Image: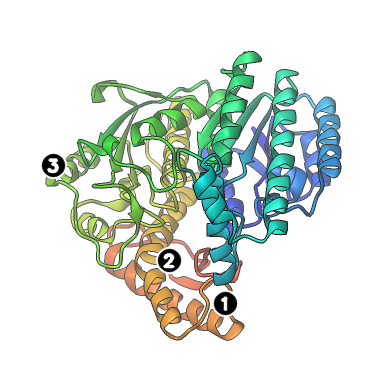
Amino acid sequence: MKITYLPLDDRPCLTDSPKYLAQIAGIELELVETDQEFRESALHSDAMILSLDRWVYGGLVKSRVLEILLDKAEKRISELEGVLDSCRSPVYAYSVLMRQAPSAFSEEEAVLADKIKRASIHYDDSKKFSEIIQGIPSKIWDLYLETRKRNFKINQKALLLTAENKIQFLVFAMDDLIEQGLNQKEKRILEKKILQEKLQERSMIIPGTDETGFLLLTKTVLKSAKLSPAVFPFYSHPDSNQFLLEYEDCRLSELVDLQLKLIGGRLVNKREDADLLLFIHSPQENQKDVPIDPVLGSSSQWIDELRSSLSKGLPCILADLRYANGADPLLMRELSYKIDFSKLLSFSAWNTAANALGIALSHGILRWSFLQRKQDSDSSKEESFSKSDENKAHFEFLYLRFLEDWFYQSEIRPALSLKLKSEKHSVMNLAPRIKSRCENEAAQKLNDLSWQYLKSFPCKRGIKSVSFPWNRLFDIQIHLQKDFRREK
């Protein structure tokens, strides 16, 4: 199976991850960067996954500014329609409902973006809105509204292409959410349109953004393999649904249900009916970003259940959603002494709850689907770590998730951020000298932590270097040593 994949933008998390996931699934993926590459690849692909924001605007950040006016954006959609008319493979597309705040690349821009976000949230409250709007230059606010208007019209056109069967499945992803604001108004209009066009089975509106392409990749593979995994969830907190997620507009169980529905999986009420077990380290209160001094909150019963399931060889996915933007470091240290991390199908604590859950489900279910197909086609169940590209990709990607989601995002980045702020340096626009210093420090600490806490891993790969491709601390690319050896 060959899939053409046009990612949302060129961040490493969106270009490296789908390559790993395709290898884990045992399929061929051609990741393209331009519309011309997409046109050419579409002619000989079995399916296509397409970010409409990349096609129309050039990427997620560019979709939040008015560099491309409506008439040009509509022309880009018309060009896409021509491509879709000429290809016979199914197209799985996604488009982002523009978030409340524009992108910010400095502390000053972040302050203005927060004002715009609050103005959007309180748009229908004339008193609060009038107070907030006074702090926003009128030209900036007008450009913001015009950008929203353009994007919404393009989203409506995308829905029309779906109704005309030129797009097989369309996802509207919603970034950085609360339960009110201008993007929620747009959501309600699109929901009505989906019902009117009877597209409930071929279109969804779902929280999250960056993980959407991974979920569509998983959906495509499962559909081709005619698999529908049954998943049983274990929540670490019995009342997890009473707590709000930091960047989503739904409760945790609803988020799980939506993502499984999107990929073609299903929830089951009994663990014995499940193909996979989903262990979720859920918030203990309304979700917040990773704190500097966290408090261990997981019950010993939940940890024991995970340990017991892994020791029995059951397929387990671990999604750490207690905090946004990183793993719970105390939980992870506790688990490092009690479980073999390499036995997990997947792990993630990446960014928002939707992001982390989406990558954990995608990785875990694609790994499971590969093993299912391997078992069906090969009577031998013994895996060769040294010879199987799929096994190499799985263990390496799993290893990288611990490096980035736990070590870097939860332990290293907060310390680097505090240090830079104390020195009066920006963390959102790193100066070259500061960037180099932080990259070296992060690489050294990643090496130290990996040898300390990932002793059970079946592979040992030193960190060659790290880089911050967007000149900010949040986005990191970890470069591993080339040799990939099983530890004796």
Q: Amino acid at mark 3?
A: Gln
Question: What residue type is disc 2 on?
Answer: Arg
Residue 302 picture quarter: top left
| Of the two numbered discs 2 and 3 in the rendering, the one whose residue sits closer to the viewer | 3
Labels 3 and 1: the sequence-earlier one:
3
Quarter of the image where one finds residue 191: top right
Q: Residue at 59% across / 81% down in the picture?
A: 431
Quarter-of-image position of residue 273: top left
In the displayed structure, 78 sits above or below 408; it is above
**Badge number at residue 430:** 1
Outermost left residue: 300
- Hey, what amino acid is under mark 1? Leu
**Residue position marked by numbered label 2 in the rendering:** 461
- Residue for point 42% across, 43% down: 360
- In the rendered structure, which disc, 2 or 1, sits on the residue that comes first in sequence? 1
Could you tell me which secondary element the residue under label 3 belongs to?
helix
Horizontal and vertical percent position of residue 15: 61, 53
Of the 4 image quadrants, the one containing the N terminus is top right
Mark pair 3, 1: CA separation: 44 Å
Q: Which residue is mark 3?
A: 301
Q: Which label belongs to residue 406?
A: none
Circle 3 residues within 10 Å: few <14, some 14–19, many ≥20 = few
Q: Does 268 sit above or below residue 59?
A: above
Residue 240 in sight in this render = yes
Q: Image point 61% across, 26% down: which residue?
A: 189
Residue 93 picture location, percent across and down: 66, 34
In the picture, which quadrant includes the C terminus? bottom left
Colour pattern of the rendering: rainbow
Q: Secondary structure at mark 2?
A: loop
